[in-house]
Amino acid sequence: MKGNFCPVFHPTKEDMNDFQAYIEKVEGLSEGFGMAKIIPPEGWKARKRGYKDIQVQLTNPISQHVQGYAGIYNVILITEKPMDLKTYRNYATSREIKNKLNDEEIESLFWKQIRYNSPIYGADSNTETLFDEDNEWNLSKLDTTLSKGLYPYKLAGINMPFIYVGCWKSMFCWHKEDLDLYSINYLHFGKPKFWYCIPLSESEKFERFCKFHFHTDYAACPEFLRHKSTQVSPSILRKAGINVQKIVHNAGEFVVIFAGAYHMGFNSGFNCAEAVNFATPKWIDIAEKVSRCCCDPETVKIDMEEFKAKLEGDTQSMPKKKSGPRKKQKVAEK
């Protein structure tokens, strides 16, 4: 594929013993980028026994209906009936691309067909992690600034992972993570994901573009991009002078989104991924400046004074209340 590709890292087994330290190293080497790909060392497995025995129930599959033209779209999301993994696999297989295409051809075909034959995405499934319990990068047990600051609270999709089961052309729209957190996505099996991102340094430029082209949405909610229903072709954004980066995400690889980076993407066929949010100390300053969407009363809230007190071990000054509830995502892949 043509374009500005994000960096790729190859950790050693020793590197993977300390998740947060390695991520901080990766981010330091990725200046100017909004995401990076991490390919584990040879022999490393997320699930040693494989995936034949997995039980994934898609509780809220979403059909995605695209409206718009010339690279600028709104996506209407409709909740479908629950289905099990076998049923979804059969559906996804019936939609597979028939011809053998290279990455550039797949990317081109997606944007040509985006308005047609609406896909169903098995996103935000609150299922147990597919990682082995003792895996050092088990996404349900990441030891980061976020898990320390939230302890003992668990918020689904924030510090508890979601499962995402996709098919050809299922997508996730432009968005930042809740509270501008970091995120990590592991592709357990299946066809590749195609990711696009805009680094934090270009966020304001992207937001100005979207406010102009989606002025009705902006008038209704200044944080409308957090609704995860806005889709814009990277080629249109590049013509507007916005730095759009991309990467192809294959099975057995991780993609990390850095704090505050806008991102979107699509699936090139049947696949299964797992994702969760996390944080490093760098995120705390970003979190203190985050603007929140107030359309949904269940939008994620974290009391930052309580959060920082926990990190500092100052339990005496902590407010006697729980962190806010987790909002159900609108097809926003990590």
Image (cartoon, grey):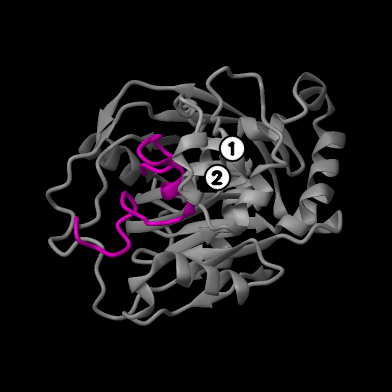
Mark sitting on residue 308: 2
* Residue 300: quadrant of the picture: top right
Residue 229: x and y in percent read 63, 32
User: Which element is circle 2 on?
Assistant: helix
3 or 113, which is in the foreground? Answer: 3
Q: Are marks 2 and 1 in contact (CB under 8 Å)?
A: yes
Residue neighbourhood size for the residue with mark 2, other residues' Cα within 10 Å, grouped as few (<14), some (14–19), many (≥20): some
| Residue with the mark numbered 1 | 305
Q: Is residue 114 visible?
A: no
Q: Which residues are magenta?
A: 133-162
Residue 323: x and y in percent read 48, 29
How many numbered badges does the structure rendering display? 2
Is-magenta flag for residue 304? no
Q: Is residue 112 above or below residue 330?
A: below
Q: Is residue 79 above or below residue 155?
A: above
75 or 197, which is in the foreground? Answer: 197
Residue 183: x and y in percent read 50, 52
Residue 125: x and y in percent read 34, 35
User: Which element is circle 1 on?
Assistant: helix
Question: What residue appears at the point 77 percent right and 19 percent down from the top-left corner?
Answer: 220
196 or 170, which is in the foreground? Answer: 196
Q: Is residue 168 left or right of residue 265?
A: left
Q: Quadrant of the N terminus?
A: bottom right
